[in-house]
Amino acid sequence: MTLFDVYPLFDIEITKGIGCRTYDKQGNEYLDMYGGHAVISIGHSHPYYVQKLTHQTENLVFYSNSVINKLQVELAEKLGKASGYEDYSLFLVSTGAEANENALKLASFHNGRTKVIAFKQSFHGRTSAAVRVTNNPKIVAPINEGFDVEFYGLNDIESIRKSLQNKDICAVIIEGIQGVGGIQVPNAEFLQQLNVDCKENGTILILDEVQSGYGRSGKFFAHQYADIRPDLITIAKGMGNGFPIGGLLISPDFKASHGLLGTTFGGSHLACTAAIAVLDVMKAENLVENARKIGEYLIQELRSIPQIKEVRGLGLMIGLEFEEPIKEIRNKLLFDKKIFTGVTGTHTIRLLPPLCLSKSDAVSFLKNLKEVLDSNTVV
Ligand SMILES: Cc1ncc(COP(=O)(O)O)c(C=O)c1O
């Protein structure tokens, strides 16, 4: 059997990771300014994480959601404290798309509506209401029967308000910071007004914090810069530091009932152990604060580099937009300087390093980036 060839690959095989460094099979060391696409939060192979997962693997990897799993309860308690959402409840899944799928479904169960507002350049995952083809009407929400989506520009509150006033919008789904869209940060005033307008019109506000959450922005959730409390918040990526786990934080306005949502793998013993280890390390090492501090330093320094047209972002979620295509800059960073970065579109480099990035790592990245930009073959 061969692999279904859907991913363009760099000719690099990463076989090891420690902290903010990865190593290929030839032993070359790379500075990881990409975090495996915002997934590595506490650093590669953190010793506490390795020890907790090893111990759990020796005892129990998985049993079904039909028996008591105290690790789920411990995770919910720790996540509530870390995020400031102690009064919300938690539904555990395995990926970001699954978290959003369930959020939309729950919103539709709640208000019986099907139309959704989303944003231009948004990205929320690749599943598509798989339940529509599932032959069990009890678990098919109205929204799964095919639904309309209206796309608006970020911050376009006037158009959105007009639409919400029709009182037929099920949910507004918005990223805390748009990731795939090129690191676009919604205005705080826009989010505040959106929150008010949603409440007034019976629309559920879903904050997709799959990429921007878990401390990446320098607060636990990016929307906390706007001081709002959405109805539903979706999480994944940094939650497991590489172990697949996602979740849905649900406001107390939603009532659970048996069978309403469900999954086989969500909240497995091993997944919860990974997520608990992540929260323990984030707390012990003050990683949210580190992301804020190092992010502020990086953004300030990057804004003084003349070849960069625009620097956007918060914390360690940073977009660098260039006038010219960035393919060569990124390749030089990777192959000459041994630094992983991400991209979005053709003109923007994305920085999504582990939250434990040190000041000296940041300094080293800046030095190497400037050398690449100053080399006349590139720009
Ligand atoms: C904001 C956002 N939501 C959802 C997803 C989908 O997550 P997953 O790939 O885990 O399904 C992503 C993935 O990049 C994302 O960036």
Image (spheres, grey):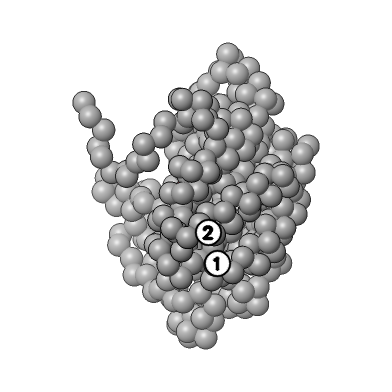
Tag 1 near tag 2, CB within 8 Å: yes
Q: Residue 141: percent from the left, percent from the top?
A: 38, 56
- The amino acid pointed to by label 1 is Ile
Is residue 257 visible in the rendered image? The answer is: no
> In the image, which disc is placed on residue 373?
2
Q: Is mark 1 within 8 Å of ligand 1?
A: no
Name of the residue lying farthest toward the left: 1
Disc 1 from disc 2: Cα separation: 9 Å
> In the image, which disc is placed on residue 308?
1
158 and 343: which is toward the camera? 343
Q: Residue 357: percent from the left, percent from the top?
A: 67, 44
Which residue is drawn at the image coordinates 75% and 54% (left, top)?
293
Is residue 292 shown left or right of residue 16? right
360 and 274: which is toward the camera? 360
- In the rendered view, tell whether residue 125 sits above or below residue 168: above
- The amino acid pointed to by label 2 is Leu
Name of the residue lying farthest toward the top: 58
**Secondary element type, mark 1:** loop
